[in-house]
Image (cartoon, helix red, strand yellow):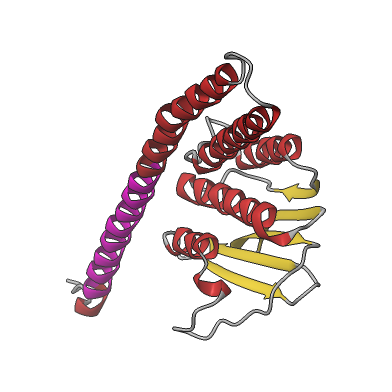
Amino acid sequence: MSRSDPSSAGDTSKQADISAQEMVTQAHRANAVQDRDAERESIARELHDRFGQYLTVMELELSAAGRIGNPPPEFRERLERMRTLTAEAQKDMADMAWQMRPASLHGQDLETACTQLVDEWGSRSALVFDLHLSLSTRLPALVEITLYRVLQEAVTNVVKHANASRIGVILRVVSHEVLLIVEDDGCGFVWDDTPGRDGPARSLGLLGIRERLNLVAGELEIESSANRGTTLIARVPL
């Protein structure tokens, strides 16, 4: 009669425990992403609906005030400046709400969703995009939504801070990891990744990208220098 190897049974039990822990961790990560997206959706809706309505009413009232009676030219000029500023604030707030909207692939594959995102940014800015997307298969859902959000926040950072004219995007699977590279020709910055030191590493956009990638055990590398553009490299293991 053969005897079972106790060490083999122990190894199997350990592997099962590790698999169970990984499943729990994955579920926690997915819940964290869902909670964060729900919060962003709520804020974006408040910005668009409530404050957008206030600004619309202000713009209409300012326009109407300029037509009452026969105000002096200086008064009309000030009213027009206020109306113009209100209209600009309304546009900026609408853009902010659009940028904050939760990432959603709507059943699309990651390549199609990224192409659509870039097309939307192209219509809202003067940026020229150079895309090289080469995924041969679908990725895990959490990885896809994470990389989509990373691209979304990376492009938003470029629009807000880089004063760039072109953005290159590379998305591909290399060995056992997926690689997303976002490169711009903007002003760049002096990169300092010293832990605990204030600077670009602590900016809201880059922190958001790092936090996203941490949820899928990913990493972020940044290459930048003044007046030489910036390259963001996101790596996610598969």
Q: Residue at x 66, y 42 (%)?
A: 114
Residue bounds of the magenta highlight = 9-37
Residue 142: % across, % down: 46, 48
Report the front residue among 135 and 3: 135
Report the front residue among 198 and 149: 198
In magenta segment, residue 104? no
Q: Residue furthest bottom?
A: 194
Q: Residue at x 68, y 56 (%)?
A: 158
- As displayed, is residue 77 above or below residue 184? above
Q: Quadrant of the N terminus?
A: bottom left
Residue 22: % across, % down: 32, 61
Residue 147: % across, % down: 56, 52
Q: Residue at x 49, y 79 (%)?
A: 198
Report the front residue among 13 and 108: 108
Q: Residue at x 82, y 53 (%)?
A: 165
Does 33 sit left or right of 161 as displayed? left
Which secondary structure is most common in the magenta stretch? Answer: helix
Does 50 sit left or right of 1 as displayed? right
- As displayed, is residue 28 above or below residue 186? above
Does 55 sit left or right of 20 as displayed? right
